Amino acid sequence: MGVVALFALALLGLNLYVQSEATQTRIQQELSHRIHAHLQIKRMSVTPWGGLKLTGITIPQTPDAPPGDFLDAKSFRLRVSIPSLFQRMLVIKEIALIEPHVVWRQNEDGKWRLPTSNDPTIETAARSEPAGAEPVTAATPSAAAPDHSSGPPEKTSFQPEVRRVNLTGGNFQFLDENGKVVARFEGVDFFSAMRRSLTLRGDARVAKISLRDRFFLSDLRSPLRYEPTAVDLSAISAHAAGGDLSGSFALQQQSEGSPFKAVVKFQNVVADRLVTEAGGPAGVVTGQLEGHLEAAGKTADPNALEGSGEIILRDGRVQQYSLLSALGQVLQIDELTQLNLTEAHAKFHITPGVVNVDELVLRSPNIRLSASGTIKFNGKLYLDSRLAIDEKIRGQLFRPIAQNFQPTEDAGMSAVDFQVSGTIDKPKSNLVDRIVGRDLKDLGSVVDMFLGRDKNERGKKKQLLRETAPEGTAASPAPSP
């Protein structure tokens, strides 16, 4: 019983010591020095099973940022070498950050930086000091500056040594300088060892990732190396739209524009799910995607992206695309209304602001669609395209239409060249005019009907022209849309 009582008294005394204003201020200050930011702690306690526990952990945003905290964590546990608390060296065996929520905003220089403190004592201590220099302490009653007139300065500041860092249940939001969400990371777990000051190496797991609310990953795993100037995920594995993804990612968050480099390989990605998750219509493309992408750019400028890649669609089908469906019904070509693809691939390279389509091919048993051109990041596109059909399909066409398909270098194939413009959301094409030809303009009204264009609207425009034309003159016919 005596041993238990002594242990209880020692634990009580240790808690009183740790919870004292002087000790709490010193630990808070030294941890702030360590991360070069103003760390705030509401409460500290010590238990034999959990070590030193800090609760109510926050790091405020910089003064020019929106209201709220940069970091808010449920708790912050430190397993400390108890004897080191009474010495100059503070040995932290393990740091465990529990359920942190981080809102990290890009500054006007396009960099993600920790919100450094305006406290001059923290900023002074954060700078490198020559060997033997006395540490700067907070000018508070509990940790006052030493009186140099009365003898040698008292060495009161801790010198922490951190050996392991673990993070569980984290949520991170990265915002651009305008406050728009660039990326979200949910359910982040990280287990690492400290190799040297502020350098972490370990293993990371992320339950969910959202990139600009357009592309989503789940169950990401990778070795991770973190330094104040760079983050490196060297061997990523994850799931995307039902498929598998692997690759690497490196970010230099302190360099101008926060440049990054990514290498991605993917397979078995469900095409329809990928399109709908990105905000596109369902049912247009089905099948499974595989391919690769190598890209480099700057997170501060989404247009500053360069790279190349290839996408292949397996067991693909293109359906419910209004233009092809209308042509298929008008020309009585069932294969156009629903393309069951035997080949589908795209090769491309990226320059700042533009995706250059080097080769796009969609092939079904009797039809081949191909294109090359540009798609700008703002959605505008221009593609030189070709619709080629074999003799079987050509023989089914009305003769004046069949004559508009000219023989190609591929034996047994005839084609019509056309252009696609407009935007990704609202593409435009002169394919109907190229197929129908000048002598069959009335057929265009039939296509208009299948495309949902309003014939009555054109009639109303003609009537309005007749009513507003001066007497004795004939109103010019309204141009076809």
Image (spheres, rainbow, N blue to C red):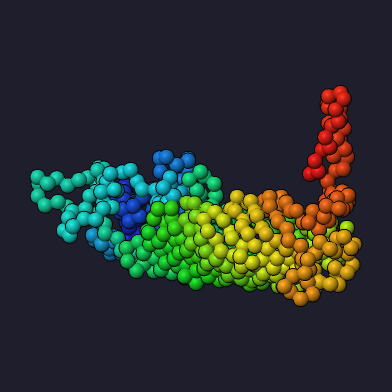
- Residue, x 26% and y 43% (percent of image)? 140
From the image, which quarter does the C terminus lie in? top right
Frontmost residue, 81 versus 97? 97
Frontmost residue, 412 versus 133? 412
One can see residue 11 in this view: yes
- Residue, x 74% and y 53% (percent of image)? 429
Q: Residue furthest top?
A: 471
Name above or below for residue 181 compared with residue 81: above
Q: How far from the left and from the top, in percent, is residue 393? A: 85, 69
Relative horizontal placement of residue 305, taking residue 19 as reference (left or right): right
Q: How far from the left and from the top, in percent, is residue 7? A: 34, 64
- Residue, x 41% and y 63% (percent of image)? 226
Frontmost residue, 223 versus 288? 288
- Residue, x 39% and y 55% (percent of image)? 255
Q: How far from the left and from the top, in percent, is residue 121? A: 27, 46
**Total number of numbered discs in the rendering:** 0
Relative horizontal placement of residue 24, taking residue 299 as reference (left or right): left
Frontmost residue, 474 versus 125? 474
One can see residue 191 in this view: no
Specify the quadrant of the image occupied by residue 191: bottom left
Name above or below for residue 268 compared with residue 178: below
Relative horizontal placement of residue 447, taking residue 186 as reference (left or right): right
Relative horizontal placement of residue 100, taking residue 468 as reference (left or right): left
Q: How far from the left and from the top, in percent, is residue 424? A: 68, 53
From the image, which quarter does the N terminus lie in? bottom left
Q: Residue furthest bottom?
A: 411
